[in-house]
Amino acid sequence: METVRLHISGKVQGVWYRASAKDKATSLGLTGKVWNERNGDVAILAQGSHNQITEFIEWCKVGPPLAKVVEVKLENVEAIEVFSSFEITRE
């Protein structure tokens, strides 16, 4: 299992990015969480197999129809917590 932190910038708040990311992650079998950052970006902590994570990252680069993704930063992290579902949080 891999754990990654994604930082998505662009027009990603107010366009259903978090809800869509949760739906996509759940459909791929990923666990973790997604939240809004104060600066207008979205952050995601996701856990799953390499293939699941790779497919999710590709989705994040586009996002939902109203989003305008400028950049997706990826960081591999050590799993501090093992998630049992994928949730929208306030981090």
Image (cartoon, rainbow, N blue to C red):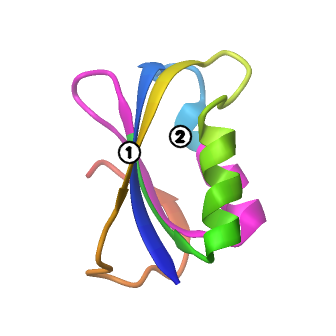
Mark yes or no: residue 1 visible: yes
Q: Classify mark 1: helix, strand or loop.
A: strand
Q: Nearer the viewer, residue 84 or 7?
A: 7
- Separation (CA) of disc 2 from disc 1: 7 Å
- Where residue 88 sits: x, y (%)? 46, 52
29 sits to left or right of 46:
right
Check if residue 74 falls in the magenta segment.
Answer: no
Counting the numbered discs, the total is 2
Depicted 61 relative to depicted 65: above or below: below
- The residue at which mark 1 appears reads as 35
Mark 2 or 1, nearer chain start? 2
Residues at circles 2 and 1 in contact by the CB criterion of under 8 Å: yes
Residue at x 50% of width, y 60% of height: 87
Residue at (32%, 21%) from the top-left corner? 40
Q: What amino acid type is highlighted by mark number 1? A: Trp
Q: Residues within 10 Å of mark 1 (few under 14, many from 20)?
A: some
Q: Compared with residue 51, is residue 19 higher up or lower down, i.e. above or below?
A: above
Relative to 74, 1 lies left or right: right
Residue in the picture at 64% in, 58% down? 54
Residue 43 point in image, percent of width and height: 37, 44
Q: What secondary structure is marked by label 2?
A: helix
Taking 3 as reference, is 61 left or right? right
Image location (x, y in percent) of residue 48: 58, 75
Q: Which residues are magenta?
A: 21-42
Q: Which residue is mark 2?
A: 18
Specify whether residue 35 is painted magenta: yes
Which residue is outermost to the left? Answer: 38
**Displayed quadrant of residue 53:** bottom right
Q: Amino acid at mark 2?
A: Arg
Q: Of residues 56 and 16, which is closer to you in this image?
A: 56
